[in-house]
Amino acid sequence: MPMRPRVWVSRPTFDDVIARLQPHFEVRAESVETKFGPAELAAKLADCDAAIVGLKERVGAAELAGAKRLRIVANLAVGHDNLDLAALGAAGIAASNTADVLNESVADYAWALLLGASRRMGAAERWLRAGHWHTTEFKGWLGTDVRGRTLGILGMGRIGQAIARRAQGFGMPVLYHNRSRLPEAVERECHARLVDKTTLLCESDCLMLVLPLTPETRHAIGAAELAQMKPAAVLVNVARGGIVDDAALAAALREGRLAAAGLDVFEGEPRVHPDLLALDNVLLSPHIASATTDTRRAMTTVAVDNVLAFFGHGPHAGHPPNLLNPEALALAGVTFPTHPKLT
Ligand code: GLV
């Protein structure tokens, strides 16, 4: 029997979804959450033809140096700042992500953070659990309404648009700033108006960050940008740690230059800046905006579909649906659907 290609799955995920690989691959799926160091990751990648990895796996040139059999890395995330696409492309290795299937869950979660931070839900829950309820005051726990306030969205991709659509329910006008203007029909559907970044910062009462982390967007919100925001504003980050300068944000929150923040992502995760941990006007969560059962299953399905497709199997045989580097693959002479099956 010809040898089947081997796929490595770096995180425990949904076994029944991963089982779809079994007829075509030798599947090596981790059964315990593990933080692989660079050398361990390099060894894992050197030993497989396909890899399904999570955000904790940082795949760069060094990790790929010995990965002579590797053909595709499927990321279990839409963001892919953990993958060095240039290094993957140069090695003729495909990369894919899980775009689209998580838009609605992440948009819901961004709103949960906005509402939770505006209404002080994290601090109130801690206070209740600490047994202080009997001391409550009529004027205690006053938060801010979001209804009718101006929502700003920095990064108006598909998740940003899903967030904007929800704003109608809260009667909120929507401003956005993005690399490019959305088609008019989409702007109309989202009731959103393009503005420059300064206007977005100055006019937003609630600012949601939904842009990818790149060298250009690192610290897109730093001390200077925070200084432009309204002191009563609430900031939400469901995008990536590093887009916000967490130390500058903590200082603004502490000094009352910003009312509140809801953060799902942090610089240097899983570490959280100690100044943020010390504040009550910030609602914190451990990078879980896409974490619903349906959405995490869908993300696993997309990763599996991409690997299957790359090797000529499954519903998208020969056409991996979420390729991130098709041009680099074409340059490297990797073609679909005639890519030779590794046997
Ligand atoms: C999560 O952060 C993702 O990019 O999917």
Image (spheres, helix red, strand yellow):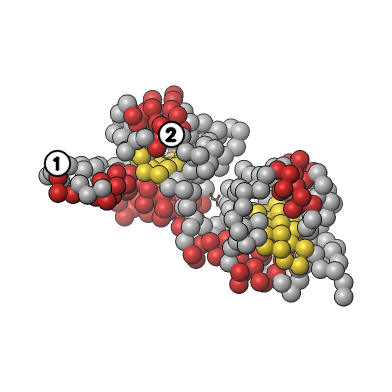
- Residue at image coords 41%, 32%: 275
**For the residues marked 2 and 1, what is the alpha-carbon distance in whole angstroms?**
29 Å
Q: Which mark is residue 274?
A: 2
Which amino acid type corresponds to the residue marked 1 in the rendered image?
Answer: Lys
Query: 17 or 136, which lies in front?
Result: 136
Whether residue 166 can be seen here: yes
Task: Give the image location of residue 141, x and y in percent.
Answer: 21, 43
Residue at the left extreme of this rendering: 138
Which amino acid type corresponds to the residue marked 2 in the rendered image?
Answer: Pro
User: Quadrant where the N terminus lies?
Assistant: bottom right
User: Quadrant where the C terminus lies?
Assistant: bottom right
- Residue at image coords 34%, 35%: 279
Task: Give the image location of residue 323, x and y in percent.
Answer: 69, 54
Secondary structure under tag 1 reads loop
Q: Is residue 28 left or right of residue 212?
A: right
Upstream in sequence: badge 2 or badge 1: 1
Which residue is under mark 1?
A: 139
Whether residue 174 can be seen here: no
Please identify the quarter of the rendering in which residue 335 is found. Answer: bottom right
Quick check: 229 above or below 190?
Answer: above
Task: Give the image location of residue 157, x and y in percent.
Answer: 52, 48
Q: Which mark is residue 246?
A: none
Q: Is mark 2 within 8 Å of ligand 1?
A: no
Quick check: 37 above or below 292?
Answer: above
- Residue at image coords 62%, 62%: 31
Secondary structure under tag 2 reads helix
- Residue at image coords 30%, 28%: 256
Query: 218 or 288, which lies in front?
Result: 288
Badge 2 vs badge 1, beta-carbon distance below 8 Å:
no
Task: Give the image location of residue 217, x and y in percent.
Answer: 55, 34
Q: Nearer the viewer, mark 2 or mark 1?
A: 2
